[in-house]
Amino acid sequence: MSKFFPLIFVLLWSSAFITTLPIVLNSDPFSALAFRFFFVGLCFFAFCIFKKLLLKVSINNLINSLSTGILFHGFYLGGVFYAIFIGLPTGIVALIVTLQPILTNIFAGYILNENVSFNQWIGVLMGFAGAVLVIGFDVGKSLPLEGIISTIVALLAITISTIWQKKVSNNIPLAVNNMYQAIGAVLFHLIIIFFIFEKPFLKINIQFMLAMGHQIFLVSLGAFSILMFLIKKNSASKTISLFFLIPIVTASMAWLFLNEDLTAIDLIGFIIASIGVFIATRK
């Protein structure tokens, strides 16, 4: 079953970009994320109780879980949601944040002592070229600069959190780690709501609840748990190379469900990125 995890992860993670739009149409990004991770934390808490997992952890493990939760679910998702909230197309957001393998490969060797092979570098550079091919034709036209900046913050956050998660490698159950990460996310977004963001709002309707249910159960409980599993079992650089596939799937979903444009240049860039992922991840 675990051999299908990378494919399942890419499909679920990509779908999150699509369901983000109906969420931010009915809520500000930070209220939505606080709402989401309150229920994510509650679900993991219930699972831990059902499985009789020990919730008491060391101070170091608690700090690491809260911190990676703030990076993953706070800065990363906060940056992505805010960019889409102010009008940056979902496909462009997905492309920018999936430049992450470049940064991960650069730091994995120094921080994690991972051996990043020549093939991995070739694959990652091809993925980068494919992404830049698409981004280069769109930046500077009608894209909000603030959205680009917040997406770059998200990119840095997920890169740092991935390396941190791999380096720390908490010896606590995955569900317990995920629960504390969700708690860290809720605290982060509540601080943003009450002290920084000026106009929080939340409209509970069918559209919002369907999209939020998808992100809670399929993305946060499903895709994110798979990502944590893959980071723990594989090298950080190989795992993160999967992210180059996400723009392809996201753009296809955005074209299918959101009527966003899918040009020939996009397709060429996506094909190049896909070949790069294959080269970077194959044995």
Image (spheres, helix red, strand yellow):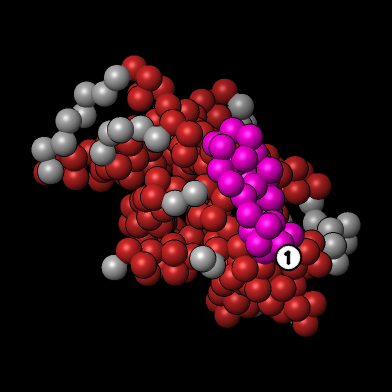
Counting from the top left corner in percent of width and height, residue 145 is at 81, 47
- Quarter of the picture holding the N terminus: bottom left
Q: Is residue 89 left or right of residue 177?
A: right
The residue at the point 33 percent across, 36 percent down is: 177
Residue placed most toward the observer, 84 or 77? 77
Residue placed most toward the observer, 167 or 202? 167
Amino acid, disc 1: Met
Counting from the top left corner in percent of width and height, residue 93 is at 67, 56
- Residue carrying label 1: 126
Counting from the top left corner in percent of width and height, residue 179 is at 31, 37
Q: Main secondary structure of the magenta part?
A: helix
User: Could you say which quadrant of the image residue 122 lies in?
Assistant: bottom right
Can the viewer see residue 53 in this picture? Answer: yes
The residue at the point 30 percent across, 33 percent down is: 171
User: Could you say which quadrant of the image residue 196 lies in?
Assistant: top right
Q: Is residue 242 above or below residue 108?
A: below
Residue placed most toward the observer, 18 or 28? 18
The residue at the point 66 percent across, 68 percent down is: 276
Can the viewer see residue 32 in this picture? Answer: no
SS state under label 1: helix
Q: Is residue 226 left or right of residue 107?
A: left
* Magenta stretch contains residue 118: yes
Start and end of the magenta stretch?
A: 98-127
